[in-house]
Image (tube, rainbow, N blue to C red):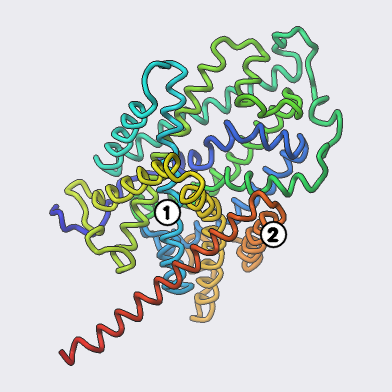
Amino acid sequence: MSEERIQLTRALKSRHIFMLSLGGVIGTGLFMGSGVIINQGGPAGAVLAYLVAGVLMYLVMVCLGELSVQMPVSGSFQAHATRYIGPGTGFMIGWVYWMSWATTVGLEFTAAGMLMTRWFPDVPIWYWSALFVAVLFSLNALATRAFGEAEYWFSGIKVAAILGFIIVGLLAIFGGLPLASGEPAPMFSNLIGDSLFPNGISAVFAVMMAVVYAFQGCEIMGVAAGETDQPEKSIPRAVRNVVFRVLIFYVLAIVVLSAIVPWQEAGLMESPFVQVFDMVGIPFAADLMNFVILTAILSVGNSGLYASTRILWAMSKTGMAPRGLARLSKRGVPLNALSVTLCFALVSLLTSFIAADTLFMVLMAISGMAGTVTWIVIALAQYRFRRELYKSGGTVQDLKYAAPLFPLIPLACILMCSSLFIFLAMDPTQRPSLYWGFGFIGVCYAAYYVLQYKRQRSAVIAPAA
């Protein structure tokens, strides 16, 4: 295989896709952010918020599943948007999604380094960050299979930790495992004791965007479709299994947290998972969760580097990014796109120190909105695809995998995602992210049409020359 190869190898197996999808939505949003959600939204409010976000994730997954089986390419929803919505939207969502993940990857390097200071306080953070940069770059550069195996084990550790936590938590709730303080088993007094919604129902809407952020990452399944062995079998299986297992993991974990940790104390000082382990007297609880959270961070960085690299590679093949990024190494890895993505991630990391109040805040605002905009584009692309199928005389029976309840599923997804922007607009602290996010989307559309105009003008002038 030569350096000029332009097709990715299908090296990912069904188990890789399943764990990639599962691990993509189990990260720091659950291990660290869930405490804040419980504190602000109240115990029942947090459970309700995660249930609603889980339903939204299901809508996205079935829409993406249908598109990915029909069109299993590495560009995923960027290619789907280009084909079924328009090249301008494909250009926009590709660059928004790439920048979002590349920015996130940069932050993960620092977060991982900070966690290591618990065990090695005298070693500078940047030492560890540099080490993790080298590790994740190597995993992505060696071969697609190496990335898949690493993510498989990263996700496995997270899933095992959550299952262990749920078992320990349920035992503590019902008195099977006594609390270290000697207090009686809490049962569900903390969950429904004061009030289902102690901060009001409006607080549930206020935290909804943060909860949805926790579920974003499920769309990486579609990005991996272009390197999946037998996508027509692997993807539907991943959609069926992942959605319900994630809902069970998330909702059960939130119920356990809310039942054991009083909502007034949740998320104020440390991970609520550490709080629970400490309350039941599990030795080395903080060190154990520090390791799990470190694994979650590395998993997010690994998946994000993979997803953003493949999106950039796919755009370069269609002229939406520099053509040189389409080259593959002898192992079938888009090294040029990987290197550019990593460089941007490191630059975004520097802005968190050098321009934290300006450029860094802009990058974070765009990154925060990118996932929700991506979900809207996925649902709209599936809606347009199905309409096109029907107009051409096709039927649902022609599809190897079909999202149910069309057109209710994609329209409900678009409506629910759009409503999240209303919640953002109602919160003065989050409102600026709307300005920067939609502003960048407008810039992307403008850039696409300027490039198109220049290409058309060059095509007209060239023959005359």
Q: Where residue 99 is drawn, which disc sits there?
A: 1
Viewer-nearest residue: 73 or 40 = 40
Task: Return the residue found at the far right.
Answer: 194
Q: Amino acid at mark 2?
A: Ile
Q: Earlier in the sequence, mark 1 or mark 2?
A: 1
Q: Is 461 drawn above or below residue 414 in the view shown?
A: below
Residue 76 placed where, x, y %? 42, 59
| Secondary structure of the residue carrying numbered label 2 | helix
- Is residue 236 among what the camera can see? no
Q: Going by the image, does 232 lie left or right of 214?
A: left
**Identity of the residue furthest to the bottom in this view:** 464
Observer-nearest of 448 and 261 = 448
Q: Which residue is mark 2?
A: 422
Three-letter amino acid code of the residue under disc 1: Met
- Which quadrant, please, contains the C terminus? bottom left
Q: Describe residue 294's horizontal placement relative to residue 323 as left or right.
A: right
**As drawn, is 94 to the left or to the right of 256?**
left
- Image marks 1 and 2: residues in contact by CB distance under 8 Å: no
Q: Which mark is residue 187?
A: none
* Residue under the image location 83 percent in, 37 percent down: 198
Q: Residue at x 78, y 15 (%)?
A: 185
Quadrant of the image occupied by residue 421:
bottom right
The residue most toward the left is 2
